[in-house]
Image (cartoon, helix red, strand yellow):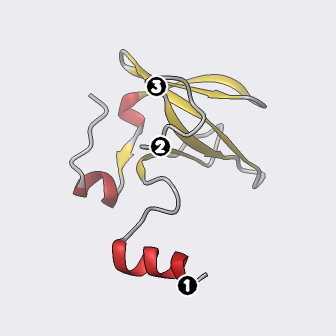
Amino acid sequence: MAALFGCISVLGCDVQPSVLFVANGTLFQMLQLTDAQDGCPAASRVCYLTLWDGSASRGCWVREHSHIRVRFADLGEKLIPVNEFQRTMVGEYRNSSLD
């Protein structure tokens, strides 16, 4: 426990992936794109989807031309236009881009 606390407070370790971009939609409440690759195939990154009914899913995302393709085991694939996403403060700080 002390090691975890020390890691978080002193070294600034990331305990969860950093959310770089978010999109709000009519079919979902929020889609969050992270920089983590944990469990996703090469070139894909982890994303989180929150639906209006309060349920949440974890999947993988990748940029394809002018869209972000997200894949969820329980919801299938979805294409969302890149211009639907806004950078988070972490994304701003890191100067992240979907280009």
42 relative to 55, above or below: above
Would you say 71 lies left or right of 99 here? right
Quarter holding the N terminus is bottom right
Q: Residue 36, which numbered label? A: 2
The answer to which of 8 and 96 lies nearer the viewer is 8
Within the image, what quadrant is residue 73 found in? top right
Q: Which amino acid does label 3 sit on?
A: Val
Mark toward the start of the polypeptide (3 vs 1): 1
Would you say 10 lies left or right of 77 here? left
Mark toward the start of the polypeptide (1 vs 2): 1
89 relative to 43, above or below: below
Quarter holding the C terminus is top left
| Residue 39, x across and y down, in percent | 60, 35
Would you say 97 lies left or right of 62 here? left
Q: Which of marks 3 and 1 is in front?
A: 1
Q: Residue 62, which numbered label? A: 3
User: Does the residue at mark 2 contact the one at mark 3 (Cβ under 8 Å)?
Assistant: no
Q: How far apart are marks 1 and 2 (CA)?
A: 25 Å
> Under tag 2, what secondary structure?
loop
**Mark 2 Cα within 10 Å, few/some/many (few <14, many 20+)?**
some
Q: Residue 2, which numbered label? A: 1
> Under tag 3, what secondary structure?
strand
Q: How far apart are marks 2 and 3 (CA)?
A: 12 Å
Residue under the point 36% across and 19% down: 66
> Under tag 1, what secondary structure?
helix
